Image: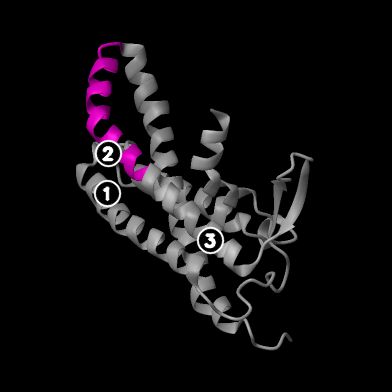
């Protein structure tokens, strides 16, 4: 069954792509650094404003997240389909200004090698990842939006569990959902940048 998971979650390979020469000059800024900073700021804002540090205690917020995700899933899948079939001179060339590299397995089972990605492959991984992330996040928010109040009721029957719920579990879940949402936002901005800027300059002379 491992091969099933590999196929279904293949877009997550996007997070393994190396592009840039250091942490703060690479795609990891969009993948992890900025989402982490903004998630911490989100939790801090909740705390300063006196809101409960539980994303699923705010029904209006949950509804807005679901509305946004429902819209973005369609956009991401459409963008992925467009990039995968787009015909433009240079789109299958390697990225300028530094290779985007993904470690992949040889089809003959002879180990791994570093594969340099083209513009088409890199952008496809971006929107494939965004499609999968938005779909999984949509399912997570729907499930916990319905189930979490019931889970909280059960846990609050125990004093120790109530303390852990309010001071550990709920803040962690708020940070987790915030991180995935900010990761979605910043990766979307990276994908839009490639669609609006980099693809339009594929055939420009390098300077």
Residue pictured at 50% horizontal, 73% vertical: 86
Quarter where residue 53 is shown: top left
Point out the tag, 2 or 3, that comes first from the N-terminus.
3
Residue pictured at 67% horizontal, 59% vertical: 24
In the rendered structure, are the residues bearing label 1 and label 3 in contact, judged by CB atoms less than 8 Å apart? no
Residue topped by disc 2:
142
The residue segment tinted magenta is 137-158
Residue topped by disc 3:
124
Residue pictured at 31% horizontal, 47% vertical: 49
Judged left or right of residue 66, residue 164 is: right
Q: Around disc 2, counting alpha carbons within 10 Å, would you say few (fewer than 14), some (14 to 19), or many (20 or more)?
A: some
Task: Residue 99 in the image: state x and y as whole percent.
Answer: 72, 65
Q: Which mark is residue 66?
A: 1
In the rendered structure, are the residues bearing label 1 and label 2 in contact, judged by CB atoms less than 8 Å apart? yes
Distance Cα–Cα, label 1 vs label 3:
24 Å
Point out the tag, 1 or 3, that comes first from the N-terminus.
1
Task: Residue 4 in the image: state x and y as whole percent.
Answer: 52, 34
| Residue 44 seen anywhere in this rendered image of the structure | no
| Residue 192 seen anywhere in this rendered image of the structure | yes
Which sits in the foreground, 104 or 96?
104
Q: Nearer the viewer, mark 1 or mark 3?
A: 3
Q: Around disc 1, counting alpha carbons within 10 Å, would you say few (fewer than 14), some (14 to 19), or many (20 or more)?
A: some
Decide whether residue 140 is among the magenta residues: yes
Assign a secondary structure to mark 1.
Answer: helix
């Amino acid at each position: 069954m491992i091969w099933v998971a590999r196929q279904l979650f293949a877009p997550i390979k996007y997070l393994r792509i190396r592009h840039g020469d250091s942490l703060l000059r690479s795609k990891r800024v969009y993948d992890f650094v900025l989402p982490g900073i903004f998630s911490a700021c989100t939790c801090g804002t909740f705390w300063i404003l006196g809101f409960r540090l539980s994303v699923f205690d705010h029904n209006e917020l949950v509804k807005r997240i679901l509305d946004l995700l429902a819209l973005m899933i369609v956009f991401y899948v459409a963008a992925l389909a467009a990039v995968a079939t787009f015909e433009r001179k240079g789109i299958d060339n390697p990225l300028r200004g530094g290779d985007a590299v993904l470690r992949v397995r040889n089809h003959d089972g002879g180990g791994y090698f570093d594969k340099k990605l083209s513009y088409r492959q890199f952008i496809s991984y971006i929107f494939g990842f965004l499609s999968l992330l938005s779909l999984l996040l949509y399912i997570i928010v729907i499930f916990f939006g319905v189930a979490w109040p019931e889970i909280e009721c059960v846990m609050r029957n125990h004093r120790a569990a109530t303390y852990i719920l309010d001071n550990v579990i709920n803040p962690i879940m708020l940070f987790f959902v915030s991180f995935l949402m900010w990761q979605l936002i910043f990766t979307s901005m990276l994908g839009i940048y490639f669609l609006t800027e980099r693809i339009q300059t594929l055939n420009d002379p390098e300077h």
